Image (cartoon, helix red, strand yellow):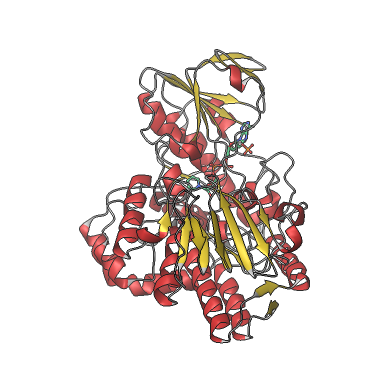
């Protein structure tokens, strides 16, 4: 179907076969599949002025991926894989942007991507069988299919702390970092938040700032990343084992190409266990979780990992009171998304870094000079919010999506997200949500989950077109049953034990509490989705 260009003087827009919202990993690949495999006319609408999605915005100091570069990348093209050489074990934000820019150029995607275009609404007209997508600039796009590729962690969560408007210095959220960066030289910097982001940012800010004050609400576990340059031998290993590594990632529970240990933590002697943890600590990275098969399944097994990390914190941090405040006690290791770091705990041994334990001395308000806690005022020039995101549902609800009869997604999800497979929502025909709530998404290495969804969606649309069908919609009863499967999968693990986790929506005041991602494993999930497709899209109504 050809694009209808806007006539002069009118807002632009047009009619397409599909509109995709977002030009990160998900939007780029979905465009490639729909346009180049299926021959559809597609418009990608992207709020940012460049491609890259979450990596466009997250440019804070120290921002780099926690998955290793050789598998935090697309697997769909052997040529792409062969021609791209990563420079470090974990890719930094700039290198991931360069990679995605390369992908956009290599596959000729740019002509179909409209940058600087924020979607403000999407409404389904059942009679016409069309989605109308509206933008901040007043454009209207129509298409039978609407695909969201908006990411899971893209809606910044800036907490409402009284007095922020009075702050005389400047403040930033890490997920909306200024393009040109921030010069911390000679500045007194406050950093609120000690999740993956704060833990990455603190050591880098501390190196530049006159003083860094870290405001910690919940002490966190962290394992060293052990980042470093990719050497030639490792690069050769990656090249020679590419197919095997990709197959392993596809078959794994979490999209990582490494093996989970066959032993439980209590199956080995204390000495063996200590040696296994020490080796995992020295190797570094998220793989630490795989040191034993039951770290996320058995509280006693988990306690051995939690205790090991607590002991490491006491070993690294020289001031005992600071070490004590940094020691996590209120949740088992990895029940909140575990960070990995480059010198986080060591940072607290620097003379220019101090820790404020907000559990002991909560923030009262922000004042013009800085942050006032129960113990006094911390004078600051710059305040950095590493306070996370309105995860999974936030980016979707921000689009103001309305389904049949004007039904707002916000109303349907008032008590928590309801989806089928995290891909479709009853009442919202022909809407596909890539890595939506109810899919494995954030519990996996994201590109693996994204490729699976984008391919499933492309196959589904091809199936409909081949049969002269124009509509697919999740049935309400399967959505309810899937919600139960999502709940049960989480309940079979220790994940729900972290009551303040963003997996549960607990970090955003007023957000309904529900464990949002599917914790049953990426491999199991892939089988379920394949089975649904094989059975003629069972659970969906096709017309
Ligand atoms: O956000 P978070 P994040 N007052 O929500 C604190 C991914 N990621 O941006 O724990 C004071 O984890 C909050 O405290 P508490 C990764 O999946 C990936 O760090 O709620 N503090 C917590 O310490 C990660 O999990 C990479 O008590 C407040 C922190 O802010 C996800 O993004 C890199 C507060 C928020 O931690 C989110 O990580 C970085 C308040 N009012 C991130 N509100 C990769 O490398 C919140 N906090 C792939």
> Closer to the camera, 482 or 147?
147
Could you tell me how many numbered marks the image carries? 0
Let me know if residue 409 appears in the view: yes
Quadrant containing the C terminus is bottom right
Q: Is residue 153 above or below residue 147?
A: above
Q: Is 80 displayed left or right of 450 in the figure?
A: left
> Closer to the camera, 540 or 509?
540
- On the image, the x and y values in percent for residue 283 come to 39, 53
Q: Is 427 displayed left or right of 30 in the figure?
A: right
Let me know if residue 291 appears in the view: no
Q: Quadrant of residue 413?
A: bottom right
| Residue located 54% across and 81% down the image | 465
Which image quarter has ligand 1? top right
List the single residue furthest toward the left.
232
- On the image, the x and y values in percent for residue 305 come to 56, 51
| Residue located 37% across and 47% down the image | 226
Q: Quadrant of residue 374?
A: top right
Q: Is 334 displayed left or right of 125 in the figure?
A: left
| Residue located 68% across and 50% down the image | 504
Q: Is residue 79 above or below residue 148?
A: below
> Closer to the camera, 536 or 247?
536
- On the image, the x and y values in percent for residue 369 come to 54, 12
- On the image, the x and y values in percent for residue 350 come to 41, 24
């Amino acid at each position: 179907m050809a694009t209808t260009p806007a006539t002069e003087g009118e807002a632009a827009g047009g009619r397409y076969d599909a509109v995709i919202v977002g030009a990160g990993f998900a939007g780029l690949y979905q465009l490639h599949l729909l346009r180049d495999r299926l021959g559809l006319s597609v418009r990608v609408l992207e709020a940012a002025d460049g491609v890259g999605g979450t990596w466009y915005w997250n440019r804070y100091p120290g921002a780099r991926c926690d998955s290793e570069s050789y598998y935090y990348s697309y697997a769909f093209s052997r040529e792409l894989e062969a021609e791209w050489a990563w420079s470090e074990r974990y890719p930094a934000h700039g290198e991931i942007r360069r990679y995605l820019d390369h992908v956009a150029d290599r596959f000729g995607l740019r002509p179909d991507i409209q940058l600087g275009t924020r979607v403000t609404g999407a409404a389904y007209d059942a009679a016409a069988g069309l989605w109308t997508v509206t933008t901040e600039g007043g454009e209207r796009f129509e298409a039978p299919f609407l695909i969201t590729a908006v990411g899971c962690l893209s809606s910044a969560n800036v907490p409402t702390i009284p007095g922020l408007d009075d702050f005389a210095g400047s403040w930033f959220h890490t997920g909306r970092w200024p393009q040109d960066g921030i010069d911390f030289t000679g500045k007194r910097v406050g950093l609120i938040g000690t999740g993956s982001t704060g833990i990455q940012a603190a050591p880098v800010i501390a190196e530049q700032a006159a003083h860094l004050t870290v405001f910690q609400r919940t002490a966190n576990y962290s394992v060293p990343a052990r980042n470093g340059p990719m050497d030639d031998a490792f690069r050769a290993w990656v090249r020679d084992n590419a197919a095997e590594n990709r197959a392993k990632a596809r078959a794994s529970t979490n999209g990582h190409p490494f093996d989970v240990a066959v032993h439980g933590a209590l199956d080995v002697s204390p000495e063996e266990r200590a040696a296994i943890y020490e080796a995992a600590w020295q190797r570094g990275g998220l793989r630490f979780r795989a040191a034993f098969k039951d770290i996320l399944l058995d509280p006693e097994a988990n306690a051995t990992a939690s205790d090991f990390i607590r002991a490491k914190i006491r070993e690294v941090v020289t001031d005992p009171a600071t070490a004590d405040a940094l020691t996590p006690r209120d949740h088992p290791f990895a029940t909140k998304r575990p960070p990995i770091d480059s010198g986080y705990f060591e940072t607290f041994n620097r003379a220019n870094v101090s820790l404020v334990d907000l559990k002991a001395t909560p923030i009262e308000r922000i004042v013009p000079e800085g942050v006032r806690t129960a113990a006094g005022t911390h004078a600051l020039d710059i305040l950095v919010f590493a306070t996370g995101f309105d995860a999974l549902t936030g980016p979707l609800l921000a689009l103001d999506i309305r389904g049949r009869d004007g039904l707002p997604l916000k109303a349907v999800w008032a008590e928590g997200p309801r989806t089928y497979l995290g891909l479709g929502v009853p009442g919202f025909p022909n809407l596909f949500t890539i890595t939506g709530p109810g899919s494995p998404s954030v519990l996996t290495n994201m590109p693996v989950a994204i490729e699976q969804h984008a391919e499933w969606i492309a196959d589904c649309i091809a199936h409909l077109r081949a049969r002269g069908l124009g509509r697919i919609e999740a049935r309400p009863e399967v959505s309810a049953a899937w919600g139960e499967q999502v709940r049960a999968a989480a309940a079979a693990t220790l994940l729900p034990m972290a009551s303040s986790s963003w997996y549960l929506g607990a970090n955003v005041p007023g957000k309904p509490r529900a464990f949002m991602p599917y914790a049953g494993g990426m491999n199991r999930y892939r089988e379920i989705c394949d089975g649904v497709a094989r059975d003629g899209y069972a659970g969906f109504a096709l017309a």
